[in-house]
Image (cartoon, rainbow, N blue to C red):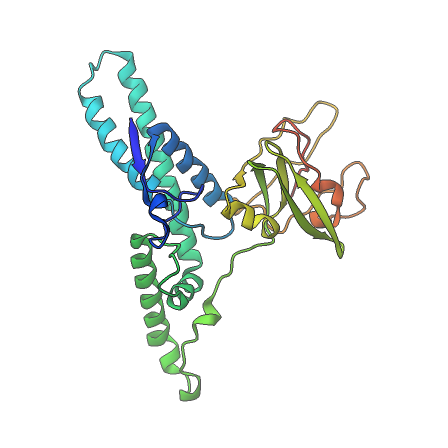
């Protein structure tokens, strides 16, 4: 099934209404391509420490596709094995859409005051990074939280201290978090290691692992997409510690001392050798604690 989307960037972000008429022409893509865009956006959102621009067109298109698939499934013979296959695919698509929205709502809730302050400062010609539903949720959350603090705490303090300062409640994105990403277009990026600027060549198809901040602009431009890495199981001769990740993010990373290679746990950015590219998902990767 073909779906029409408005012209836009590779990330599927909102379209600027002031662009040329040629950019306003709808782009016809298949439902499979829209789903792939949404899956990439879902993984980017899941692994990124910041809230990314919304994939509104892709999300709405897949919600419409889900309704069509649900109607089609009811017309199939229940004894036909293809019916179960269609139902499984339908549930998979639902999971992607719901997980994408849940991930975004979690970030909105966690960084509510930061996002609300940014929305209040945003000019009219700037695109919002929130869905309409997210902004409604954000506004209610911030308003009720502020009212709660004023009623239970601030009102009972001396008059000189009875001021609600939103900046004190801000939670900022962890741009120093480490992420895995797949290169879609050849690029170069500069990273700082031990007060030294290194230029890293990013070749199409390669998998890399580095801090989020230097590559954030590449993600926004569609030159990379974030991903997870499944390491090979440890061999009988090498016993590595398992990775532990409480927040499903790679934050404040340390490397366990392994075979005397490191004298003590240190940040990964202190060791340029860990910035080498990982040749596919089967490459050797550092095990973290």
Q: Give x and y (percent) for residue 171.
A: 49, 62
Write the residue at 62% across / 33% down: 206
Q: Quadrant of residue 241?
A: top right
Is 66 on the left or on the right of 41, as rendered?
left
Nearer the observer, 60 or 168: 60
Write the residue at 29% across / 41% down: 60
Write the residue at 63% across / 35% down: 203
Which quadrant does the N terminus fall into?
top left
Q: Give x and y (percent) for residue 284.
A: 69, 31
Q: Quadrant of residue 210?
A: top right
Q: Relative to 8, does residue 173 appear above or below in the rendering?
A: below
Is 132 on the left or on the right of 224, as rendered?
left
Nearer the observer, 40 or 258: 40
Q: Relative to 168, does residue 133 appear above or below in the rendering?
A: above
Disc tally is 0
Q: Give x and y (percent) for residue 166.
A: 43, 71
Q: Relative to 220, does residue 229 appear above or below in the rendering?
A: above
Write the residue at 31% across / 66% down: 144
């Amino acid at each position: 099934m073909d779906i029409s989307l408005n012209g836009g960037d590779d990330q599927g972000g909102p379209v600027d209404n002031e662009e040329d008429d040629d950019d306003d022409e709808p782009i016809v893509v298949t439902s499979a391509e829209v789903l792939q865009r949404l899956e990439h956006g879902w993984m980017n959102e899941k692994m990124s420490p910041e809230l990314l621009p919304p994939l509104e067109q892709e999300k709405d298109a897949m919600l419409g596709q889900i309704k069509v698939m649900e109607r089609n499934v009811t017309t199939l013979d229940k004894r036909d094995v293809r019916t179960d296959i269609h139902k499984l695919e339908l549930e998979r698509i639902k999971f992607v859409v719901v997980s994408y929205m849940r991930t975004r709502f979690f970030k909105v809730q966690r960084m509510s005051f930061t996002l609300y302050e940014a929305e209040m400062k945003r000019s009219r010609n700037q695109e919002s990074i929130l869905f309409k539903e997210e902004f409604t949720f954000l506004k209610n959350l911030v308003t009720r939280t502020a009212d709660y603090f004023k009623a239970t705490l601030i009102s009972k303090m001396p008059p000189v201290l009875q001021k609600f300062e939103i900046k004190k409640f801000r939670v900022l994105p962890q741009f120093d978090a480490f992420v895995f990403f797949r290169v879609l277009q050849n690029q170069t990026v500069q990273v700082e290691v031990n007060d030294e600027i290194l230029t890293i060549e990013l070749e199409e198809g390669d998998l890399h692992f580095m801090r989020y901040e230097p590559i954030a602009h590449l993600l926004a431009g569609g030159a990379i997409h974030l991903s997870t890495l499944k390491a090979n199981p440890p061999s009988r001769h090498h016993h590595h510690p398992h990775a532990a990740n409480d927040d499903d993010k790679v934050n404040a990373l340390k490397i366990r001392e392994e075979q005397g290679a490191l004298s003590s746990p240190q940040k990964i950015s202190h060791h340029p050798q860990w910035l080498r590219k990982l040749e596919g998902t089967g490459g050797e990767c550092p095990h973290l604690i």
